Image (tube, rainbow, N blue to C red):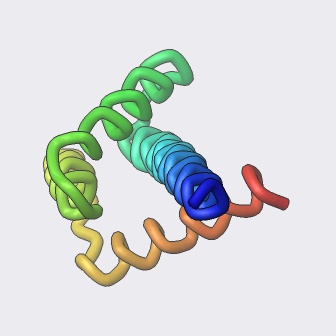
Amino acid sequence: MAGFDERKKSFETKMVLDAEQEFKLQARRNKLLGMWVAKKLGKSDEEAGKYAMAVIKADMEEDGDDDVFRFIKQDLIAGGHNLSDTDIREKMDVFLTEARAQLFE
């Protein structure tokens, strides 16, 4: 029975670590995405950093990427940048790949 308890504890520890890594990955992706949008909107370096943090916070509203997508799409439209949904989603994927490389390679 002790072996089962050890495996259970090991599995739980792995789940916590995986969740932590996923959070870090999404936060890094959102920072990169936020900096990209901020640059498109002509924000200063200081404003861009604050905007990137706002994108990270926007991701905490609901599960998945839709909250971030809506947040940046709204700002891009307000800034006169009419990118398609596909273009924005592709950019999100590019930054996810970049974030993964930065964190895990």
Q: Front-most of 58 and 34?
A: 58
Judge left or right: residue 8 versus residue 63. right
* Residue 85 at least partly seen: yes
Residue 102 is situated, as x and y percent measured from the top left of the image, at 76, 53
Please say whether residue 29 is visible from this viewpoint. no
Residue at the far front in the pictured view: 1
Q: Depth check: 78 or 63 in front? A: 63
Q: Position of residue 17 (x, y in %)?
A: 59, 48
Give the residue at the far top of this rendering: 46
- Horizontal and vertical percent position of residue 38: 42, 39
Of residue 78 and residue 5, the one placed in the foreground of this image is: 5
Residue at x 66% of width, y 61% of height: 3
Please say if 102 is above or below 85: above
Tell me if 14 is positioned left or right of 73 in this view: right
Q: Quadrant of the C terminus?
A: bottom right
Where 92 falls versus 86 (above or below)?
above
Q: What residue appears at the point 77 percent right and 57 percent down from the top-left corner?
A: 104
Q: Quadrant of the N terminus?
A: bottom right
Residue appearing at x 48%, y 43% in the figure: 27
Q: Give the mark count.
A: 0
Q: Among all residues in the image, which is located at the extreme right?
A: 105
Q: Residue at x 22, y 57 (%)?
A: 63
Position in image of residue 30 (x %, y %): 45, 47
